[in-house]
Image: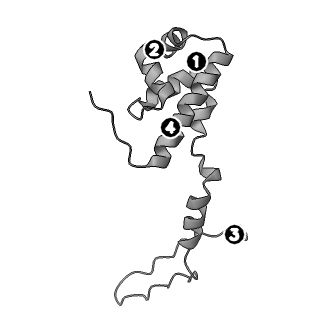
Amino acid sequence: MSAKTIPSLRAGAELSKLGNDIAIARKRRRFTQQRLAEGAGAHVATIRRLEKGDPGVSLGVLAMVLMTLGESDRIANLLDIAKDDVGLVLSVNDLPQRIRPKRQRKAVAGSQDVPERHSDRSEPEAF
């Protein structure tokens, strides 16, 4: 079986670091690879691959390993949208230059006048 390629050297380095960090966290908790595999519902070989930074290990296995290590909140915070600086900058750049009020339609001859609904109003109606 050939090794799966990863498109970026940096991504490969980050996965290697993640795998090493998982191995250190496992050892700090005095877990064997077998114990971690049982807790995560995976094979020992999969845990070894994860600890080596293999990009072919599923996200589901990573999530279960983090839960077994007591770090279940980590997966939810991988790309927290509140901390997505690039996304926030892009969304600000996409804002319109100016906001124009909606034009009112002219009444067409022969049609009944229908009162306009003002659901956009923030002030209450006067009685």
Instruction: Find numbered disc 1 in the image and state the secondary structure of the residue it sits on.
Output: helix
Which numbered disc covers residue 41? 2
Which numbered disc covers residue 37? none
Between the residue at mark 1 and the residue at mark 3, the CA separation in whole angstroms equals: 57 Å
* Residue pointed to by mark 3: 125
* Residue pointed to by mark 4: 15
* Amino acid type for the residue under numbered disc 4: Leu
If the image is split into quadrants, where does the C terminus sit? bottom right
Q: Select label 4 or label 3 by which is in front.
A: 4
Along the polypeptide, which appears first: circle 1 or circle 4?
A: 4
* Amino acid type for the residue under numbered disc 1: Thr
- Image quarter for residue 18? top right
Label 3 neighbourhood size at 10 Å, few (<14), some (14-19), many (20+)? few
Task: Answer whether residue 99 is visible to the viewer in this image.
Answer: yes
70 shown above or below 32: below
Along the polypeptide, which appears first: circle 4 or circle 2?
A: 4
* Residue pointed to by mark 1: 68
* Amino acid type for the residue under numbered disc 3: Glu
Along the polypeptide, which appears first: circle 4 or circle 3?
A: 4
Residue closer to the observer: 92 or 75: 75
Label 4 neighbourhood size at 10 Å, few (<14), some (14-19), many (20+)? some
